[in-house]
Amino acid sequence: MDILVNNAGVAIGGTFEAVSEEDSEWLFEINFWGVVRMTRAFLPLLQKSDDARLVNLSSIYGIVSPPGQTAYSASKFAVRGFSKSLRRELAGSKVEVTVVHPGGIATSIADNARVPKDMPPEEAAKRKAIAKKALRMPPEAAGEIIVKGIERRSPRVLVGNDAKFLAFLERLAPNSYWKIFSHFLPSS
């Protein structure tokens, strides 16, 4: 099987009003346009294969939209929508599409996240520390789940119990899931 895995992601913590347009564009260039450009570059090669899979990493925030993650969530919803539509366009071809929705994976994404320029350093440090607490699953374990999903030819892979729970909660209560979920969050 020939595989292209589009796995790039950066984060910006802050409300829509606090995050600059420049920072939002930077994030979209990487999180969304990176996926689109890599797909455009490699799809012709994948289409020549007898068995190919395109794997795009979204996020659980491509299924749910937490406050303070407007830009990140929008970029990951875009990856999800792009992947689902492309899957339908490629139906009947030898290229299949998987979209991956990781939950809290213990990467350096929180450490490297941008914050609004006018956010006080102590507030930025506090927010990053809270975000890091949610990043529990070792990257190696996440990788194994993703590989198994690719091997099973799954169109969607949820990585982690947190992702599975939030995806279920969003289906159960699409307009009030965050109000329900917020009861499980630690108070700041």
Image: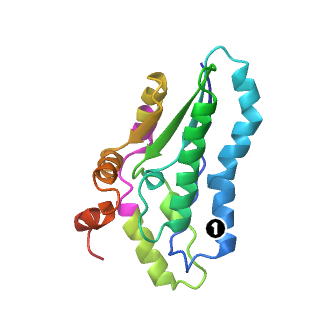
To which quarter of the image does residue 93 belong? top right
Q: Which one is in front, 115 or 19?
A: 19
* Picture layout, residue 174 above or below residue 88: below
Instruction: Give the secondary structure at mark 1.
Output: helix
Q: Residues within 10 Å of mark 1 (few under 14, many from 20)?
A: some
Q: Quadrant of the N terminus?
A: top right
Q: Quadrant of the C terminus?
A: bottom left
Q: Position of residue 162 (x, y in %)?
A: 32, 50
Side (left or right) of 174 relative to 33: left
Q: Is the magenta stretch mostly helix, strand or loop?
A: helix
Residue picked out by circle 1: 24
- The image quarter containing residue 141 is top left
Q: Position of residue 129 (x, y in %)?
A: 40, 69
Q: In this view, does 98 lie above or below 161?
A: above
Q: Which amino acid does label 1 sit on?
A: Ser
- In this picture, residue 4 sits left or right of residue 121: right
Residue drawn at x 74%, y 38% as measured from the top left: 40
The image position of residue 59, as x and y in percent, is 47, 50
Magenta segment includes 161: no
* Count of numbered labels shown in the rendering: 1
The picture quadrant where one finds residue 67 is: bottom left
Residue 133 belongs to magenta span: yes
Where is residue 25 drawn, in percent x and y?
68, 65
Q: Is residue 37 above or below residue 45?
A: below
Q: Nearer the viewer, residue 38 or 90?
A: 90
Which residue appears at 29% of the width and 52% of the height? Answer: 169
Residues 136 and 81: in front is 81
* Residue at the limit of the structure toward the left, as seen here: 183
Segment tinted magenta in the rendering: 132-144
